[in-house]
Amino acid sequence: MSVGIDELLERVRSGYVRIRPWAAYEAARTGEALLVDIRYAALRDRDGLVPGALVVERNELEWRLDPRGSHRLPEATSHDLRIVVICNEGYASSLAAESLHRLGLHRATDLVGGFQAWREAGLPVEPAPV
């Protein structure tokens, strides 16, 4: 039986608590969470970056954040790591967070409204490097 994307998102999001921009900002500021920006380069170039966020292309996310993986980043220290996935508007990040849950990263979540909500909340944004 097939399922539409809206139903899939609803199912995925029911499996964890999503985080809002100011809460994500505070969690990152205090070292309680790692912000991970999965937006593609054209969006980062156009809109800028979340200061301190780790940029990981979506197609590399699981390989880079799996603490047991041979291609993991130094920041991928533990399955207890709290990861906040950021996409452009908060849709692709939900699917990405669910994928991280499947790897055992049980504290992974995503940013409600994505980068656009972050910017609209007046949180820091820096230009992408040229």
Image (tube, rainbow, N blue to C red):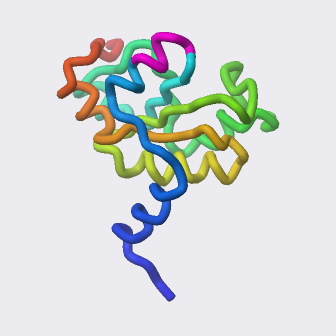
- Residue 27 point in image, percent of width and height: 48, 20
- Residue 121 point in image, percent of width and height: 21, 25
> Considering depth in this image, is 113 or 39 the residue closer to the camera?
113
Q: Is residue 22 above or below residue 69?
A: above
Which residue occupies 48% across, 17% down? 28
- Residue 91 point in image, percent of width and height: 36, 51
- How many discs mark residues in the rendered view? 0
Let me know if residue 96 is in the magenta part: no
- Residue 57 point in image, percent of width and height: 50, 37
Image position of 25 (left or right of 107):
left
> Considering depth in this image, is 64 or 24 the residue closer to the camera?
24
> Considering depth in this image, is 105 or 89 the residue closer to the camera?
105
Q: Is residue 28 visible?
A: yes
Q: Which residues are magenta?
A: 26-31
Which residue occupies 34% across, 34% down? 20
Which residue occupies 39% across, 13% down? 51
Which residue occupies 37% across, 32% down? 41
Let me know if residue 28 is in the magenta part: yes
Predominant SS along the magenta part: helix
| The C terminus, quarter of image | top left
